[in-house]
Image: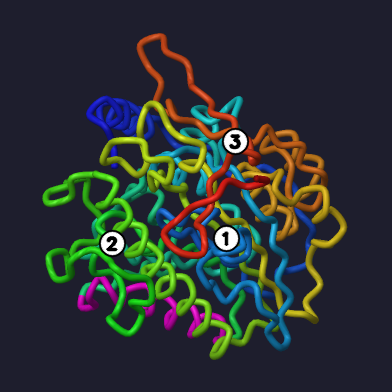
């Protein structure tokens, strides 16, 4: 949810993003050998890293903690998001902007689609959030021209779109064609009242059902007053949504997809302020005075056990709970065979090396009129995670 000021800044950034001339072509050198496997970036919506079982003792079942035959899962734990607003994060994940140079990179350098096509990959974008060909997250028609297959689910209910995305992903992973696939999931953006089936109503009491059946995301808070009792119901609905849109999503992928020639990176665009501390308000993210959880996201690498790509284990111990979204774009380029030293000069460090990340997220991404970006550092000692029931506990206490 954008505040009014954030909307104005977004429009200013969008005008800059869309007004620049032709982008630079791909100039980075890469190895000659073709990429012979799928590369998938799954960008979930509003999934807070502290609410999944891979990171928190009482987190929601994600299907990412268990072992699965023929698959290796590398959990990088808590990661810092690029920003606490969706568009800011998504455009940067697609263009590779860095903390120090995101405006120039995002507006003038090649997209991830251009790098993928140069590497010989077919490109696929799965957008489960929008319909009718509508573009979002600062994507425009010029960028779209480098996407070979653009997928939306016009005839699918909001509740079932992540399952439709899973089915499409399974189809792509099983087609024996090396592809770059980027997915924007429905996830758990407000409203979460109706984003899961009745069979997944594990956490109760929960928000009333039936009012927001076909609303993917909105900034309106009609009927939600943001009082402590409201947030208790919200957190239960949120956890039910995670059971469905994260746990069941991955259950289907692991059960039906051929992952032997696939590398998947899973994250979310940003985290959430679920008001565990009793702080007042209606916002879950995108505010100008964010709590740390708004920038706290999961970061998981999933790979076929026999597939040889990068040595994920080598730096996992040092990079777990210490990396960020800014490490994803250079990781994708390294996976595509681009020269690592040259990648690092422009885009920073991938997950295959010590990331040495600042562990901050940007809550004034669209800075203008002389303002500067504002960075929020995440201190994991103060993060609040869900307790065994309605109660919450702080990490390390």
Report x, y in % for residue 97.
56, 36
**Where does the image place residue 287, in percent across and percent down from the top left?**
35, 32
Residue 113 appears in the rendering? no
First reached walking from the N terminus: tag 1 or tag 2: 1
Residue, x 33% and y 85% (percent of image)?
199
Badge 1 is on which residue?
117
In which quarter of the view is residue 58 placed?
A: bottom right
Which residue is the site of mark 2? Answer: 192
The rendered magenta stretch, by its main secondary structure, is classed as helix
Image side of residue 106 versus residue 149, left or right: right
Q: Residues within 10 Å of mark 3 (few under 14, many from 20)?
A: many
* Residue positioned most to the top: 370
Q: Which residues are magenta?
A: 155-175
Residue named by callout 3: 378
Question: Position of 291 compared to 11: left or right?
Answer: right
Determine if the magenta segment contains residue 158: yes
């Amino acid at each position: 949810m954008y505040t009014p000021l954030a909307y104005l800044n977004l429009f200013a950034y969008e005008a800059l993003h869309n007004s620049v001339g032709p982008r630079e072509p791909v100039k980075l050198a890469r190895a000659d050998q073709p990429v012979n496997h799928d590369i998938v970036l799954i960008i979930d919506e509003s999934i807070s890293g502290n609410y999944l079982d891979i990171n928190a003792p009482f987190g929601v079942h994600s299907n990412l903690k268990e072992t699965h035959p023929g698959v290796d899962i590398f959990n990088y734990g808590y990661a810092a998001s690029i920003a606490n607003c969706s568009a800011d994060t998504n455009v940067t994940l697609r263009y590779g902007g860095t903390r120090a140079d995101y405006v120039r990179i995002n507006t003038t350098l090649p997209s991830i689609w251009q790098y993928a096509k140069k590497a010989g990959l077919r490109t696929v974008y799965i957008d489960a959030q929008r319909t009718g060909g509508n573009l979002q997250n600062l994507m425009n028609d010029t960028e779209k021209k480098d996407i070979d297959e653009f997928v939306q689910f016009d005839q699918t209910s909001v509740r079932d779109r992540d399952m439709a995305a899973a089915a499409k992903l399974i189809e792509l992973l099983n087609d024996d064609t090396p592809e770059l696939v980027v997915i924007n999931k429905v996830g758990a953006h407000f409203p979460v009242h109706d984003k899961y089936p009745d069979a997944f109503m594990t956490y109760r009491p929960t928000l009333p059902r039936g009012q927001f059946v076909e609303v993917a995301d909105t900034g309106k808070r009609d009927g939600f007053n943001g009082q402590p009792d409201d947030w208790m119901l919200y957190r239960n609905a949120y956890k039910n949504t995670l059971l469905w849109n994260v746990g069941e999503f991955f259950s289907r992928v692991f059960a039906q997809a051929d992952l032997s020639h696939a590398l998947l990176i899973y994250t979310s665009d940003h985290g959430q302020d679920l008001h565990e501390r009793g702080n007042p308000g209606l916002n879950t993210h995108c505010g100008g005075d964010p709590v740390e959880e708004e920038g706290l996201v999961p970061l998981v690498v999933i790979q076929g056990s026999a597939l040889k790509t990068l040595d994920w284990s080598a730096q996992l111990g040092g990079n777990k709970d210490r990396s960020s979204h800014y490490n994803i774009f250079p990781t994708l380029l390294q996976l595509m065979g681009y020269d690592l030293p040259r990648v690092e000069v422009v885009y920073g460090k991938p997950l295959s090396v010590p990331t040495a990340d600042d562990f901050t997220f940007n809550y004034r991404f669209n800075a203008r009129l002389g303002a500067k970006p504002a960075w929020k550092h995440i201190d994991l000692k103060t993060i609040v995670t869900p307790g065994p029931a309605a109660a919450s506990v702080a990490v390390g206490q």
